[in-house]
Image (cartoon, helix red, strand yellow):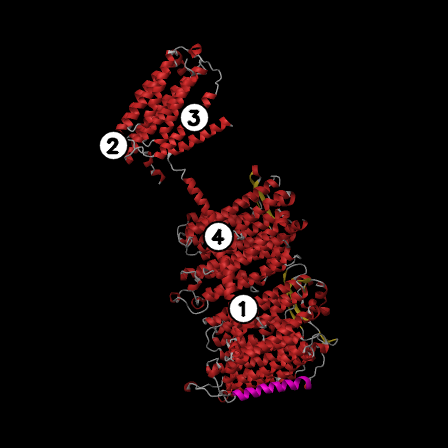
Amino acid sequence: MEYSLFILITPFVLFLLLGLTGHKMKQNVAGIIGTVGMGFAAALSYMVAYQYFFVIGKTAGVFQEMIPVSFEWLRFTEKLHIDLGILLDPISVMMLVVITTVSLMVHLYSLSYMHGEKGFQRYYSFLSLFSFSMLGLVVATNIFQMYIFWELVGVSSYSLIGFYYTKPSAVAASKKAFIVTRFADLGFLIGILILSYYTGTFDFATLTANHAESVVTSMQGLSFMGLSVAAWAMALIFMGGAGKSAMFPLHIWLPDAMEGPTPVSALIHAATMVVAGVYLIARLFPVYIFAAPEVLTLIAYIGAFTALFAAIIAVTQTDIKRVLAFSTISQIAYMMVSLGVSGYGGHDGLGYMASMFHLFTHAFFKALLFLGAGSVIHAVHSNEMKDMGRLHKFMPVSSWTFLIACLAIAGIPPFSGFFSKDEILSAALHHDKLIFFTMLFVAGLTAFYMFRLYFNIFWGKEKAYDSHHKPHESPALMTVPLIILAIYSIFTGFIHFPEFISSDSTPFAAHIEWMHVAIPSIVVALTGIVIAFVLYFKGSEKPVQIAKSLGGFYTATVHKFYLDEVWMFITQSVIFKLICKPIAWFDRHIIDGAMNGLAWTTQKTSASVKGLQSGQVQLYVWVYVIGSLLIAALALFL
Amino acid sequence: MANLIIFICLAIFIVIMSLMAVTSKKILRAATYLLFVLIGTAGLYLLLNFHFLAAVQISVYAGGIVVLFIFAIFLTSNKGDMIDNHNKKRILYGIVAAVAGIAITGFALLKHRFLNYSDNPTIAGDQEMNMKMIGEALMGTEKYQYLLPFEILSVLLLACIIGGILIARKR
Amino acid sequence: MIKMEYYLIVSTLMFFIGVYGFIARKNMLAILISLELILNAVEINFAVFNRYLFPGSMEGMFFTLFGIAITAAETAIAIAIIINVYRNIGSVNVRKINKMKE
Amino acid sequence: MNILSLFVLVPVLMILFLFVCKSMQQIRTVMVSGASALMILAVTLTVMFLQERAVSNAEMLFTSSTMWYPSLNIAYAVGVDGISVAMIVLSSIIVFTGVFSSWNMNMAKEYFLWYCLLSVGVFGFFISVDLFTMFMFYEVALIPMYLLIGLWGTGRKEYSAMKLTLMLMGGSAFLLIGILGIYYGSGHSSMNLLEIANNLHIPIEIQRWVFPATFLGFGVLGALFPFHTWSPDGHASAPTAVSMLHAGVLMKLGGYGCFRVAMYLMPEAAHELGWIFLILTGISVVYGAFSAVVQTDLKYINAYSSVSHCGLVLFAILMMNRTAMTGAIMQMLSHGLMTALFFALIGLIYGRTHTRDIREMGGLMKIMPFASVCYVIAGLASLGLPGLSGFVAEMTIFVGSFQHADVFHRILTIAACCSIVITAVYILRTVGKILYGPVQDSHHIGLPDASWYEKVSAVGLIVAITFMGMYPSGASELINNSLMPIIEKLAII
């Protein structure tokens, strides 16, 4: 399957081509080249998936890992070297499909959405760069290759968030996104250093083989500050994942990242890049569960808290992209929880499977939601809910596809979200009741805020639109991707996921637990929808009253619990004013002052000595006489 | 004994004149005092029986150099020939150096016993220096004869004449 | 009897009076006069040492002789310079001769 | 004729030709052809070196030696190993691009005369294996700096030139003490590095004071905390190409010297006293980065960033294992290239906007897209983007440094790792302020983008940075084998 290499090469070549010569091309040409190239990569991915799952299939009941391409890129020591290669296993193949599909849809959609923007070619070259790096990340054969592409993903995300570079808010958001994730990556890097030092390898295959034997044995009995070294390493690596996947408290960059063009949000900040953290944990799952199970518990709790937290904030946001951003955080937290509560092997690994399943389905319906939001924004030229209402009659396709996505995310059967969320909940139920109930509540909240969004945009009160510029349905280039993604959102739930993906690559049978999980979750979701319907369908005044009655809590929620302010305080006041400024001052005044002081002292000394060299012979004579007399006196009296 | 009295008179005269030469406010007077000092010195040479030396002292110093000084003074003095000695600090410096020097040198002088010392110069060389001997010593090239320094000195003097003219001539 | 030290005391006094004059005076000619005193004191010493310590030889006397000649040369040059300086800056005050310093 | 001597001869010939040049045209012709000749020589040397090394296992290749001051055993001894070859290639690239960056200098003839003299010193230093000859070339490289900054600089140029020269001279005083200490300590029979390293032994009592003197002497040039303060002022005042050459090559002289002289000849003392300097370099790394965050002058930002990055070089050298040292040399290459690129671009921007204050600029991406894109690339290289040179160098250093089992080295490594986050902060802050956002100063609208010679300089450096970032094993292989002698020496202890 060496041809899988072309999945990587195609977007990279596109990036170089569009990046270097794009400004000489016509916009449409550049866009079409990009889209066709991406289509080619997508086709190859589907081929790889088909071949991997159905042609090669299982050996000894297990989907084998394959490394069709690998070469040494940089050698550190005898044992440690960075290889670049392609690792195919069920989750990476699944990711290839997800990424290329969403990416292709976004490419297609952007042809129309970004039409006429300045820097259209640049946009496409960055999209290609992003696709390249994301694909490289998922097929990484070793942890360092993953880190390399991890960073590249960060940079392409930075460039795309800051695409409207003349807008200060976009620049600030891109900077924030990069620095926050970079900070998290520091943890990732240190984690890699610790892990690789003890195990002597970067290789995923070696790390995870035989129940992560290499990690367990090499770090046995080592502890640092009360925690085992393995736990430190894995927690630090999780920190990297938490940064990219926007887990609390590193989630602050994601809402701001919505400053980027909407299709970018769909691709990067909803479907692909932000799940890289989840993917990383999944990739190293055996290491986590065998070497550092306590970290998994931590992941589960952080995930559950983030899910709840983000969902609460999502309820009060009025910028539709921000609602979606918080919903993304919340949904990714679902995946994290699911990994955190998972066991290993067979049905115990339900959580692992569910996490991947949710990742898969979420990618499509969240991309659909963002693209739908983009379509709406395109029509009304605003991100704010208050400028929207009753759009259903103007843009029916957007409305229907949006509804499908909302149903999917709310977990209403038979839409895809129901199946994956259900598996997560049942994994949680068997692991930890507290987490289960939290997640169930979050499911209700999700349904509520998504339908709040839906009703507010497409129903509710009609706003006074400009009569010359009535909102209208988006062109076909934009609606076709919506429809395709809607189809995905409806049907992907029916794929029998445990057949393909499981923690130990051995298929197992999973069934829906109707009594304990499914029915409660459907009921909760429906409750949420009904409340939303009551409050928002007609556009009543009740939401305002409820908000008022909640008082301080509501205000805090609107302000995202003031976390941005806290971060701002830490970065601006603590780091900038209390660390950097004093250091710079210290450097200029103390260190440099000492150096200048040295020069000053020399100068002063010589200036005072210079007085003796007055050019007055008489003084010289005096000194000479006195000097010779002194010598004479010394000779006489000593 | 008479020699001693003459010496004492000469010594007091020389010291006083020296002091006057360096303290006098008027430069022309200072030059005159210098002349007296030089003449006194010539007297010392006579006491020591260096007659030729005394003659040279008077002719070169008193006759040549002091006259030169007086011409120079006439050429350079503008309003009076006052030496405005207002710099107290400098005078103090000078006094310190001079007093210290006299003390240390005097101490060394009096404490020290010279070798080959004869208290009575008359025994060894109390006779007039023979002019013939001086002439031979100046014109010979043997040991203790000084033709070479003599010639070098003459070249030096020539150089001085040329230099003096060159420096002092009007441009 | 005149002891050698007597002569030496006189020359010492003359020497340091000369030193005083050299340091304390401003007029260049006065400085030159002090210089003459110093040289004169030294010459006396040569003659005295010759007479008392090495009565048979004439080195001291010749040294004095050459000394006098060189002093004459030196004075001539010095006075030429002083006159020239005076022409240029109109003063013989040493404190004012600082053109080269600036 | 030894190929190595050509590296000194070519700049000398350039100087001679410059003397007879009359017009700007002729000067440029001489400079471009000379610099190209150096480039070609460097490439030839690399190829020849690789061929030669395949068949020979000598420590240094192309050696030759001529005694020129026998009473002190001072010889003009040359020889290269993989590390020197790498440094020579770097120098030739920067000299070449520097010529294009100083295309429109006033008093061009004199400027280029000094520039060539500087190159003589730099190349001479890297090819020498004789301690004193090395020192001599080192001084030859320093002195022109004073004139180049003092005459062609901007701002407080006299002050900066004076400060830079005095501090570096202070360093070289230490260095001279060190060299003499080595010479006499090893029994005053040879000044040849290889001879001393392989056949002679310096007693540990002498090493104890010679090692700090030597390390400090070179360390001043390598911007070792707290002797780095010449760097911000010096760079801020220097003309573009001089900044490039200085940060790009001259600061590497420090690292190279520490490595070649201090560590190689005195491994025992390095083991014993290394920790002191390790702490100092660790401080350099973090401290430089933090200081850069609040600077407002572009060149100051870059100078402090150089302090941080060069600190990393010395840091890695002191880690004393093969991987970290490979990383150190790679970091020298990488930092040389990207800093040169930075300074070239800053010079370009300053030449047009007449300000280097980041608060007074904004939206340059719209006005000069080419320069801005290059600046972003330089920034990304600096903050360690994979695919550009900074990443491979830093990662090699971090992985290498982490191979120590004790907590002290690890904590320092982790602290050094933190610098990459801070680097990201100041790079993005700068990029965000000057390139993005709305145009700050309406006078800037309509300023021309890079002209062709500036493009040559920038593109040349970017190509080198990308090449190294994409194909790191080339550099790594070149360096790695040559590290064996010193690693063995360090490991014996």
The residue where tag 4 is placed is A592
Give the main secondary structure, helix, strand or loop, of the magenta stretch. Answer: helix
The residue labelled by disc 3 is B103
**Chain for mark 4?**
A
* In this picture, residue B171 sits left or right of residue A459: left
Expressed as whole percent of the image width and height from the top left, the position of residue A182 reads: 56, 66
To the question of a shared chain for discs 4 and 2, the answer is no
Could you classify mark 4 by the number of other residues whose Cα lies within 10 Å: few (under 14), some (14-19), or many (20 or more)? some
- Are dots 3 and 2 on a single chain? yes
Question: Which range of residues does the magenta coloring cover?
Answer: A515-536
- Residue C82 seen: yes
Rounded to the nearest angstrom, the CA distance separating label 3 from label 2 is 39 Å
- Residue on which the image places disc 1: A178
- Local crowd size for mark 3, using a 10 Å CA cut-off: few (<14), some (14–19), many (≥20): some
| Mark 1 closeness class: few <14, some 14–19, many ≥20 residues within 10 Å | many
Task: Give the structural element (helix, strand or loop) at label 1.
Answer: helix
The secondary structure type at the circle numbered 2 is: loop
Residue type at mark 3: give it: Ala
- The reply to whether dot 1 and dot 3 touch (C-beta < 8 Å) is no
Residue that label 2 marks: B78
Q: Are marks 1 and 3 on the same chain?
A: no
- Quarter of the figure with residue A498: bottom right
